[in-house]
Amino acid sequence: MSDMNQRRLIPLVDRAFQFKYTAVILGVAAVTSTALGAFLFRAYQEMNELLTLAGVSGLVVDKVGAEDARRVFQITVASLVAEVAVLGVLGLFVTHRVCGPIFVVTRHLQTMIDGRHPELRPQRAGDEFALLFETFRTLIVQSRARDEVEANLIASVIAAAKKGPLGDGDVAALQGLVDERSQRLAASSATES
């Protein structure tokens, strides 16, 4: 398995984010389960009180009451543990689907900061932020195409310069490239202000 594929299998991409939101999910589950358990226990107590008031007493009520209380407690605790386990795994899975695309885009941005074009891979099925990922993919493809056109233009002007003095067309092509870059820089500076 390649190094890239090994990284894609790690379920914790952004530990702080994933643990934080999984803890929130687990906290909500614990509170709701505790409230439900308290409600069930109170209902059990009321049932016992009604049986006692109805005249059912003695060893049968005491035996059934103790067994039922233990059973209700065991079911409540088992349900809470199962719910926490399921929601914990689900929380990590869901947050991974959110963090994965952000991790990939961040890594590609770092590659671009380093002056290179990243090698794109398709987004995993089920990942979130599909529009962000697709927009970023389009940015990289267009940036790569623009750099290729500019490199070809500069190479052709250099080839022409090696043959002799540059013609007006070559100078105009270079000036057009400089003007386009200047306009892009001015437009981005204007939007940042």
Image (cartoon, rainbow, N blue to C red):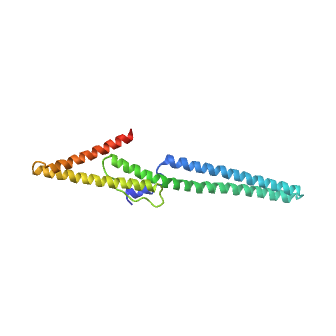
Where the N terminus falls, by quadrant?
bottom left
Residue 140 image point, x, y percent: 34, 53
Q: Position of residue 114 (x, y in %)?
A: 32, 46
**Residue sticking out furthest to the right:** 55
Q: Residue furthest left?
A: 164
Seen at 70% across and 56% down, the residue is: 74
Given residues 129 and 18, the one toward you in this image is 129
Quadrant for residue 59, please give it: bottom right
**Viewed as shown, does residue 76 lie left or right of 44?**
left
Q: Quadrant of residue 84?
A: bottom right
> With respect to residue 192, does 18 lie above or below?
below
Q: How many marks?
A: 0
Where in the figure is residue 47, as x and y percent of width and height? Answer: 81, 56
Relative depth, front residue between 1 and 181: 181
Residue that appears at 81% across and 54% down = 46
Q: Quadrant of the C terminus?
A: top left
Kindly identify the residue that appears in the image at 59 percent across and 51 percent down. Answer: 25
Q: Among all residues in the image, which is located at the extreme top?
A: 193
Q: Residue 183 or 115: which is nearer the viewer? A: 183
In this orientation, which residue lies closer to the viewer: 101 or 129? 129
At which x and y percent is residue 153?
21, 52
